[in-house]
Amino acid sequence: MFKLPERIQLANLPTKIEKLERLTKEAGGPQIFIKRDDQTGTEVSGNKIRKLEYVIKEALDQNCDYLITCGGIQSNHARATAAAAAKLGLGAYLVLAGSENEAIDGNYFLDKLLGADIEFISREDYSESRMEIMEGIKYKLIKQGHKPYIIPEGASDGIGTFGYYTAMEEILEQEKQLGVHFDAIVLAVGSGGTYSGMFLANKILNNNSVIYGINVGGDAAYFQDRIMGILKDSFRYIDYEASFSKDEIRIIDGYVGVGYALSRPEELEFIHKLARLEGVVLDPVYTGKAMYGLVNEIKKGSMSQYKNILFVHTGGIFGVFPKSDLFFNL
């Protein structure tokens, strides 16, 4: 049909799939499985490294020697980018929303340990001007003799899409090995690239799973538009255009809570409960909210048409540590 873009090998793949026996019993609905993309590596752990394998390959093909990207102060993507850059002998420049006066903990600590250059900006500037700020850094680095490459938030663009296209291929192979078919696949949506890749592969490979995203910021309409844009951008890499409608992009809204990267007591208690129940640690920004949303949807009966549900654990364990005091003051 077409050839996927090339990538470099950075992640530990394939990641395993486990059945969550006790959570399934507690939720009282379909069988719940979890794909451990939190185990794609240590320094590079989480879902972002799958996308970065494609993105950084493109940067290397362009002879770039510096990676510029952005995120919140506890960004898993920024940390994974810094780690991948260090491994490959590239420079990393991170634009982070927050203040340098915040505690050096979690992902921020690792960013510094890995030697990344960091520029802090206000959350307002991040929302409105992060691309212009990264372009300014790119210009500065060019003047210094470097050849920089800008990676958008979450590596969520056309080339990054293929990280989760290949993850979907991996899941289909694991279904054969496990003797199970996942009627629905559920994941957190923060920048749209992970969902885009799985949706595209599901469509092109004629798989009949329903792909659900649970947004941890924004709303369903925003992410439907965002994902449509990412998918259209991905087509230029494969000389192929899949046919789909916005209505096929399934976003379960209602679990953002008090806002992106902000935690409610019930979300933290759920993370704590799952850790004790299954020995699986979710993060408060992405997977905690998404799994909390999935279990609530199961209990409401809105997932009763499915027999087997796969939840994609997209990582984020380092983001737990800066909020450790909140878990025991519920």
Image (spheres, rainbow, N blue to C red):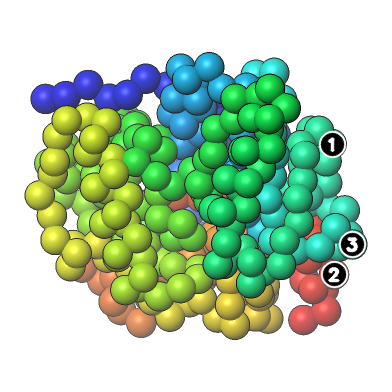
Left or right relative to 36: residue 247: left
Residue appearing at x 29%, y 65% in the figure? 224
Residue indicated by mark 3: 101
Point out the tag, 2 or 3, that comes first from the N-terminus: 3
Point out the tag, 1 or 3, that comes first from the N-terminus: 3
Q: Nearer the viewer, residue 273 or 65?
A: 65
Q: Quarter of the image for the N terminus: give it.
A: top left
Dot 3 falls on a residue whose secondary structure is loop
Residue indicated by mark 2: 325
What whole-number distance in Å separates the C-alpha atoms at marks 2 and 3? 19 Å
Instruction: Between label 1 and label 3, give the one nearer the viewer.
Output: 3
Q: Position of residue 189 (x, y in %)?
A: 44, 60
Residue indicated by mark 1: 113
Dot 2 falls on a residue whose secondary structure is helix
Point out the tag, 2 or 1, that comes first from the N-terminus: 1
Q: Is residue 52 above or below residue 7?
A: below
What whole-number distance in Å separates the C-alpha atoms at marks 1 and 3? 16 Å
Asked whether residue 23 is in view, the answer is: no
Q: Which mark is residue 324?
A: none
Q: Position of residue 185 (x, y in %)?
A: 33, 54
Mark 2 and 3 residues: CB-CB less than 8 Å, in contact?
Answer: no
Asked whether residue 4 is in view, the answer is: yes
What type is the residue that disc 3 sits on? Asn
